[in-house]
Each structure stands twice: as C-alpha cells, then as structure tokens.
Image: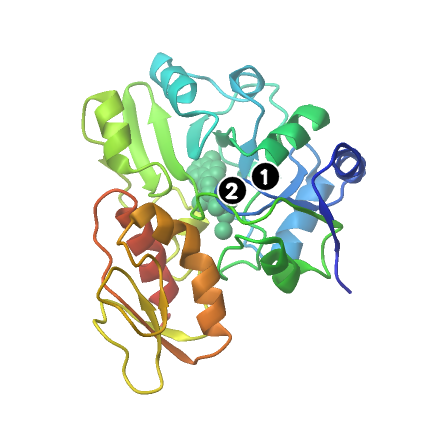
Amino acid sequence: MSASIVPVLPETVALAVEILNAGGLVAMPTETVYGLAADASNPDAVVRLYEAKGRPRFNPLIAHVSGLPMAMHEAVFSPLAARLAQTFWPGPLTLVLPVIAGGSVCDLARSGLQTVGLRCPSHMAANALIAEFGRPLVAPSANRSGHVSPTRADHVDADLGDRIDLVLDGGPCDVGIESTIVAVEGDTVTLLRSGAVPADALEAFIGKALERASGSGITAPGMLKSHYAPKARLRLNATEPGSGEGYLGFGPGAREGLNLSPEGDLAEAATKLFAMLRALDARYDRIAVAPIPMDGLGEAINDRLARAAHRDA
Ligand code: AMP
Ligand code: MG
C-alpha cells in the first residue's frame, strides 16, 4: 500500500502535525532532499523511523528546528556556532554541537552521543511544519538506508510508501544534495560531511581552513563507504559509456545518455544527481559517470558518487 501523497496546504500541514503528535512518520520536502520527519522527543517514533528506513541505530539523526531560538534549547552554542547559524540558516548547514541539559531531542535520536546535529531548513513547507509542531523534528532522507536520496515525492513513495503515514508533496527539491555537516567546538570547525554549502564558503566566513574529520570516531551515515547507492554498478570518471552501460554525462561534450548539466553548472548537476541516478538505475545494470570538477558543489557531488560506486568486498 502507498502512503497518501498530498500537496502542502494549511490543512495538510495540520494533518501532518496530528500524525507527528501521535508518533507517526511524515515525509516532507526540504531544499536539500525529502526528509522523513518524526517527533525528535519521542523514542517510540524515532524507533519507527529507524525501522522504516532500515537505518543502523548507531547513526544519529539531524534535528530540524525553526530557527536559532528553538535550537538554543537543544545545544550549547559557542559564539562562532551562533554566528554560523545566523549567517547560514535557514539553509543547508548542519551544526553538530554539545547537547544541553533538558534538551528535547531524545537519546536514541542522538545515538547516545553527547552532541546533537541541528539544522534550520529554508524550505517553506518544512518551516511551516516545524513551526506548527513547535518542537524539533528529526528528518533523515526519506529513503531506505543506503539507497539513493529522494528529491521528489514519487521517489519517497517508491522507497517507503508502505512504511510511512503521509508524504507532503512540495515538488522537486531546489538544491538536491544533502546539507553540509560541521562540528563546532569553540573556534574549531570540523567538516563531517561535504554538502550543499561548499567548504570554501564556510572557510571564507570563518577566515581559516576547515578541519577534516579523520574518518574514525563520529559516524555519519553519509560517512559510510557505501551509501546513496543504486542497484547498478557505477564506473566513475568515464569520458564515454562502454557497451551496455547507461551514461550520466556532465558538460557540453556529453551527448549520450542523461546529462547532469549540459552547461557544466554544478548547482544544476546537484539538483539532478539523485533523480538521474534513479532513472538510469531503472534501465541499466551498469552506469558510467562523467568526470565532475571538484570545485564548489563538485566536492559534495563527487563524495556522493564515490559512495554510490563503492561495493564492500
Ligand atoms: P541524513 O539525515 O541521513 O542525511 O544524515 C544525517 C547526518 O547527520 C548523519 O550523517 C549523522 O551521522 C549526522 N549527525 C547527526 N547528529 C550527529 C552527531 N551528534 N554527531 C555526528 N554526526 C551527526
Ligand atoms: Mg540519507
């Protein structure tokens, strides 16, 4: 059975709030990808969410807030963390900060960590839902764990339709790639996951290079070697498709298959990445992907492609 897919209207947002208050699961559009929202303070709802996604419980969830005032009830903000939130929120930047005593994000949602990941999305529907709900919502991407992220309501339905209560359909996501995640400890900003805010934009703001996570310690699902993965095998940095391969091109040279951006625009490529991977995955067992430059959003796109291509030995 499919979940009901409804347009974003005052009455459907009210229905979503009712479902969330009862411990249910609602997929909502954000500017990055569709998120699967649950009440961050309700461990039963959070268990349902982990189970619906098949997500390992050691992977903490991001709590979505309506702004800095709500966030300050959940975490300790250093002056730099507060400036980052003021500058990049609402928007696709997640801050991992020390959790505050009395915060509402339950232990399970944080995987027992003493930190909490917080983000204020800029999408109107997500904002309206969080504001009406009045408390943080956890909202990992609304797909089966490890699979390609959803950027349209029908992607959510295909992955999770029989496991969730409602999908708010806000059309295709504007950015198309997940948030950038940084941990902020005092003045130190560590990049945990590249994403929709390019690292160089953050570096320009803080006036120094970001620390890079060593790979051990904090686990983010987006840091697992295999993630965002289609069924098909991916071959990266391919200048043309081989026989029997679907092709995901980039830039003016690529004529065959699908093209992430004929103009070579990385923002356009980010928007189309997951939908095109899903479309090719439905038709091919093998997909060749054109080289993507590493600047700006290219770092996040290449990160997703590398994990999508990875096969555990
Ligand atoms: P997703 O919502 O699936 O895109 O993933 C959310 C990301 O935020 C994951 O990679 C989480 O591991 C990361 N995250 C959330 N909370 C924390 C935390 N307290 N410490 C480290 N990473 C976190
Ligand atoms: Mg995800």
Q: Amino acid at mark 1?
A: Ala
Up/down of 267 relative to 264, above or below: above
Q: Amino acid at mark 2?
A: Pro
In-front residue for pair 73/296: 296
Q: Position of residue 254 (x, y in %)?
A: 26, 68
Element class at badge 2 = loop
User: Tag on residue 12?
Assistant: none
Element class at badge 1 = helix
In-front residue for pair 211/143: 143
Residue 229 visible in the shown view: no
User: Tag on residue 109?
Assistant: 1
User: Tag on residue 60?
Assistant: 2
Instruction: Specify which label sits upstream in the sequence, 2 or 1.
Output: 2
Q: Position of residue 37 (x, y in %)?
A: 64, 41
From the viewer's perspective, tell me whether residue 167 is left or right of residue 58.
Answer: right
Within 8 Å: ligand 1 and the Cβ of disc 2?
yes
Residue shown at 31%/37% (left/top)?
A: 191
Up/down of 220 relative to 205, above or below: below
Q: Position of residue 264 (x, y in %)?
A: 26, 54
Q: Position of residue 277 (x, y in %)?
A: 43, 65
Q: Local crowd at mark 1 within 10 Å, few (<14), some, or many (≥20)?
A: many
